[in-house]
Image: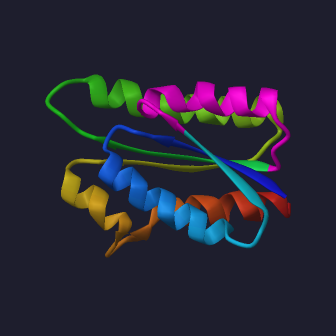
Amino acid sequence: MKFGIVAAKFNQEIVDKLLEGALNELEGRGSVEVVRVPGAFEIPLACRNLINKRSFDGLVALGAVIRGDTYHFEVVSDSCAQGVMRVSLDSGIPIGFGVITTENEEQALERAGGSHGNKGQDAARAMLEMLNN
C-alpha cells in the first residue's frame, strides 16, 4: 500500500503532533510520503496534485486552524474541508480528514495527543477503514 500525508506548516507545533499520530497509525502498513504545505487552505490542491501525479491508495490531510479575531477562520476551515471532500469524491481516493478547528491553542493541543486523543491518528485510521469498504 502507498499512502500520502499532506500536512500544513502553519501551527507547526500542533500539526507535527498530528503527523506523528498519523505516521504511528500507518506504520508497517505500507510506504508513506509526507508533503508539507504553507497552511490549511493549500491542503486540497496538494491532495489533488498527489493523486494526479502518483498512485496512492489513500491520503491523510492534517492541519490546525485556530480561531482569531476575524472571519478568516471560517473561510480557511470551510474551504479546506469542502476542498478535501471534493478531491476525495472526484478521485474516489479516501482522504482522512485531520484538520482540527479550535477556539484556542489549548484545545488544539488537547486534540493533538492530549486529553482528546490524536486526531491525526484518528484521520489515518478513518482512511484505512474506508479502504476496506
Quarter residue 88 falls in: top right
Q: Position of residue 36 (x, y in %)?
A: 51, 38
Q: Which residue is farthest left?
A: 69
Q: Is residue 68 magenta?
A: no
Task: Please report the bounds of the magenta region as a residue range.
Answer: 36-57
User: Number of labelled discs?
Assistant: 0
- x and y percent of residue 102 in the render? 29, 49
Using the image, determine if residue 42 lies above or below residue 125: above
Q: Is residue 52 magenta?
A: yes
Q: Is residue 54 above or below residue 118?
A: above
Rendered residue at 67%/66% (across/down): 26
Residue 51, visible in the rendered structure = yes
x 74%, y 52%: residue = 3
- Is 22 located above or below residue 79 in the figure? below
Residue 59 locus on image (x, y percent): 69, 47
Which color scheme is applied? rainbow
Give the image location of residue 51, x and y in percent. 77, 33
Image quadrant assignment for residue 110? bottom left
Visible in this render: residue 78?
no
Residue at screen point 18% across, 34% down: 68
Q: Give the residue drawn at x 51%, y 66%.
A: 21
Quadrant assignment for the C terminus: bottom right
Looking at the rendered image, the quarter that the N terminus falls into is bottom right
Q: Main SS of the magenta segment?
A: helix
